[in-house]
Image (cartoon, helix red, strand yellow):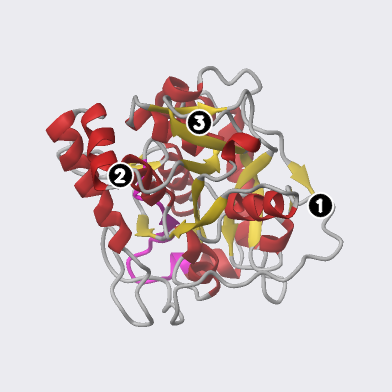
């Protein structure tokens, strides 16, 4: 196993690749701290304390959820939730993000400031600019995939902007904005692999996915339908799957096609398998479910997204900068919003 891993890394660029892989492996050590602990972030304390434990809150089956992408209609009016954010010491929006997803939310080692950047980070800055009048009035908290719901429910963050797929189950636990990106599940594997996609070429193979991800849910459904793959390898963060693939510990990774493309861009020896994603999914900004009618934050974020989709300096500009190199043109642009009221 070790020999295979070293061979893969040599194909990835020799000593430089080994150094990068070691750095990436460090992400395996990161977990969301228990209540009262400091959190890996750009600065300061959070919106609240997280409850103990490392598992994402177990979702209950959503009832009457026929269109999970539908959200509250947009509004630019302030309410109690936004006022509480503005009156907070430091006056910053606290946003849960990823710091290991290339082109989505990551730290470029070649950037002297080591500031977080990427498609999701641009959106978080825009939300802060519209709500607080300052695009830099945002405090980023690095949240593992399997901690996103818990971080929102505990009040540790105001929202999560972290390639989070909108699903009926998750809407029982948190509120979502309208969709800001369309994607779907896809297989990532070495170019030399005989794996060709979501089919019997996965039989007998070890497949990695992130805990609490829609990828793991999809794999579970495929297992019920006869998929004969080992899907027992799960990790806190999706990037950890890439590391395991590079080390030869798994044969394939299943994740959103948008994330898979970004991971393939980091390693020229791997590629997306299959002509198209298995399904269609949408990313949304996740927030705490409104209490006592305080839905102002959800509606305000939806207003920001309305403007962001239309602005020449908004969605399209960010897409062209971060995602176009790996995903190509976006002929359909951002997904059109759906509203429930």
Image location (x, y in percent) of residue 51: 46, 81
The residue where tag 2 is placed is 247
Q: Secondary structure at mark 3?
A: loop
Q: Quadrant of residue 107?
A: top left
Q: Which mark is residue 340?
A: 1
Image location (x, y in percent) of residue 1: 30, 47
The residue where tag 3 is placed is 314
Residue at x 12% of width, y 34% of height? 15
Q: Left or right: 278 with respect to 4?
A: right
Q: Earlier in the sequence, mark 1 or mark 3?
A: 3
* Alpha-carbon span between mark 2 and mark 1: 46 Å
Image location (x, y in percent) of residue 100: 34, 47
Circle 1 residues within 10 Å: few <14, some 14–19, many ≥20: few
Residue at x 34% of width, y 43% of height? 248
Tell me, yes or no, if residue 178 can be seen here: yes
Tell me, yes or no, if residue 75 can be seen here: no
**Image: 175 above or below 246:** below
Q: Secondary structure at mark 1?
A: loop
């Amino acid at each position: 196993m070790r020999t295979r891993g070293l061979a893969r890394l040599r194909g990835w660029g020799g000593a430089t690749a080994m150094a990068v892989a070691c750095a990436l492996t460090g992400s395996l050590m990161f977990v969301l701290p228990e209540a009262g602990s400091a959190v890996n972030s750009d600065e300061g304390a959070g919106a609240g304390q997280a409850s103990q434990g490392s598992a994402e809150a177990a979702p209950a089956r959503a009832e009457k959820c026929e269109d999970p992408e539908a959200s509250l209609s947009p509004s630019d009016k302030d309410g109690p939730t936004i006022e509480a954010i503005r009156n907070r010491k430091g006056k910053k929006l606290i946003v849960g993000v990823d710091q290991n997803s290339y082109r989505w939310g990551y730290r470029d080692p070649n950037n002297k400031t080591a500031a977080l950047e990427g498609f999701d980070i641009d959106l978080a800055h825009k939300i802060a600019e519209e709500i607080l009048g300052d695009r830099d009035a945002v405090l980023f908290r690095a949240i593992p995939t399997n901690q996103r719901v818990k971080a929102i429910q505990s009040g540790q963050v105001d929202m999560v902007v972290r390639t989070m797929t909108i699903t009926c189950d998750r809407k029982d636990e948190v509120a979502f904005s309208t969709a800001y990106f369309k994607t779907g599940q896809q297989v990532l594997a070495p170019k030399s692999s005989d794996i060709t996609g979501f089919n019997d070429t996965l039989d007998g193979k070890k497949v990695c996915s992130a805990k609490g991800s829609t990828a793991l849910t999809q794999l579970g459904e495929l297992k019920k339908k006869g998929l004969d793959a080992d899907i027992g390898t799960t990790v806190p963060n999706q990037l950890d799957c890439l590391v395991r693939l590079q080390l030869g510990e798994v044969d394939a990774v299943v994740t959103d096609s948008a994330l898979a493309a970004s991971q393939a861009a980091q390693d020229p020896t791997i590629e997306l398998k299959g002509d198209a994603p298995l399904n269609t999914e949408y990313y949304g900004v996740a927030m705490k479910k409104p209490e006592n009618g305080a839905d102002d934050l959800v509606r305000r974020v939806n207003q920001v997204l309305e403007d962001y989709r239309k602005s020449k300096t908004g969605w399209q500009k960010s897409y062209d900068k971060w995602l176009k190199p790996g995903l190509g043109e976006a002929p359909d642009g951002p997904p059109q919003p759906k509203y429930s009221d």
